[in-house]
Structures are given as C-alpha cells and as structure tokens.
C-alpha cells in the first residue's frame, strides 16, 4: 500500500504519538492529504459520546482528512494496561481480522499518506494467540520505529528492528526521540544505533513537552518516506 506506514515504538511511553503527529504535520506541509489510525487504545476516558483516548484525539487534530473518532480509534478501552488484559476485563475480545478490516475501511479514503500507530512496543498481544504487529504483517506495511532515547535504548532498538525484519517487513525509517530531558552519552547512543541499522534516521527530536506538531515536524525529514 503506497504511502501507508505502521508506527511502532521500542517500548511504551517513548513518544509514538508525538512523532506521529509531527510526521502528519510534515506531510501536510508538503501539500499531502493525511489520515491516521490508532486501532487499539487503552487508557481511555468516558466522554459524552463514548470512550475517548487523548492520543487518538491528538491524531485527529493533526491529520487533514475529516475522519470520525470511531474510524481513528475503533477499539477504545478504559484501563491504562495491556490491551488484551483491558479487553478481557471489559468482556471483549480483540481479533486481528477485525482490525485489518477496520483499517482497510480507512485506507479506502485514499489519503496521500496514512499512518497506523501501534500500542506500546512491537510485540503487544491482542489475545492469547495474536499480536498487534500482525496488523502490519497482514497489510504488508513498511514500519517507522520511534526510539525512546533513554538508558537501554540501543538493545531495544536493535531487537525491535530484528523482530520487524523477522516478520518479513521493511523498516522504512526511525526517529530518535528524547523522551527524557537528560540522557548520558546521547550522541554516542544515536551513533551506535545508526551504525547498526540500514534504515534512514528521519530525525532527532529534542525533549519538547507539549510541543505542537509543527514544532515536532521541524525536526523531522519525511522525504525518505515519500520522495
């Protein structure tokens, strides 16, 4: 699928949504229409029109296509825990085939660029036998990896890249996101990851709490993704 990417992280709380909104802003600035999907979101709050997830709402504001919330985040779960556990507690079952169908519905809108944001890291369970990474596999999507720059990030980044390759997918690019304010030997860590990955480094995003997508976009280069 041309210009559709799956955005994953090296762990939870590494800034996937921050980077995804920045990428959307960067694509918008190039005159491209954009859509984003967060198929599964745990940690949702009850609103007047149903459960709502802050990350999904941020995606909705950053994209250019006017999608309904339920198209962006079809599986919304209240507890801020692993999605398969949250679903069990809610008496629900998440199935990969269902997510594939829901995402294909949005892809039929034919935005110039569509970003599908995962939950947590690469190997997040949906149920006893399926993983959210299976969505990228089923749709044959290139992957953008957000590396949370903190202690342990080198191993997390390389292991995630290995898992993506083992699943038969292409790592289209990665982003070094400074999810903590201070990191010892930051430049050395970036250099080590860069020397061990063939995929392009799409940008180094400094620690910018609450920054607008346009500010994040100023630190990203989306040209390797769309030419």
Image: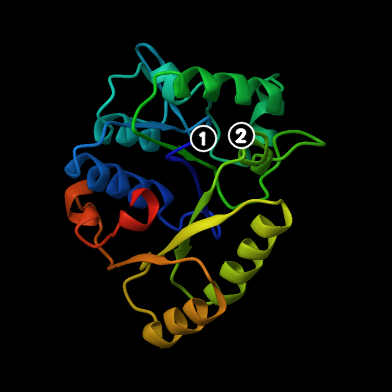
Examine the rendered structure and indicate whether residue 205 appears above or below residue 44.
below
Q: Residue at x 52, y 30 (%)?
A: 39
Q: Nearer the viewer, residue 90 or 131?
A: 131
Q: Which residue is mark 2?
A: 139
Give percent across and percent down for residue 44.
46, 30
Q: Secondary structure at mark 2?
A: helix
Examine the rendered structure and indicate whether residue 156 appears above or below residue 193.
above
Q: Are marks 2 and 1 in contact (CB under 8 Å)?
A: yes
Q: Quadrant of residue 160?
A: bottom right
Q: CA distance from mark 2 to mark 1?
A: 8 Å
Tell me the colour scheme of the image.
rainbow
2 or 1: mark nearer the eye: 1
Q: Quadrant of residue 35?
A: top left
Give percent across and percent down for residue 97.
70, 23
Q: Nearer the viewer, residue 2 or 43?
A: 2
Judged from this view, the residue extending furthest toward the top is 49
Give percent across and percent down for residue 87.
66, 27
Crowd tier of the residue under label 2, counting other residues whose Cα lies within 10 Å: few below 14, some 14–19, many 20 or above: some
Judged from this view, the residue extending furthest toward the front is 227
Q: Which residue is mark 1?
A: 1
Crowd tier of the residue under label 1, counting other residues whose Cα lies within 10 Å: few below 14, some 14–19, many 20 or above: few
């Amino acid at each position: 699928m041309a210009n559709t990417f799956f955005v994953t992280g090296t762990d939870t709380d590494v800034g996937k949504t921050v980077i995804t909104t920045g990428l959307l802003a960067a694509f918008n600035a190039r005159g491209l229409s954009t859509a984003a999907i967060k198929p599964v979101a745990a940690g949702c709050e009850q609103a007047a029109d149903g459960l709502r997830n802050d990350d999904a709402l941020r995606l909705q504001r950053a994209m250019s296509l006017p999608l309904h919330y339920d198209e962006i985040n079809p599986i919304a779960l209240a507890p801020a825990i692993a999605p398969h556990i949250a679903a069990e507690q809610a008496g629900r079952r998440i199935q990969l085939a269902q997510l594939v169908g829901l995402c294909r519905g949005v892809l039929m809108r034919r935005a110039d660029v569509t970003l599908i944001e995962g939950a947590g890291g690469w190997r997040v369970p949906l149920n006893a036998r399926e993983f959210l990474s299976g969505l990228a596999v089923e749709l044959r999507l290139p992957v953008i990896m957000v590396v949370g720059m903190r202690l342990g990030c080198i191993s997390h980044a390389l292991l995630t890249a290995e898992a993506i390759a083992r699943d038969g997918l292409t790592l289209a690019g990665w982003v070094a996101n400074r999810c903590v304010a201070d990191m010892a030997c930051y430049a050395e860590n970036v250099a080590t990851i860069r020397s061990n990955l063939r995929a392009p480094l799409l940008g180094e995003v400094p620690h910018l709490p609450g920054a607008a997508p346009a500010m994040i976009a100023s630190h990203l280069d989306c040209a390797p993704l769309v030419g």
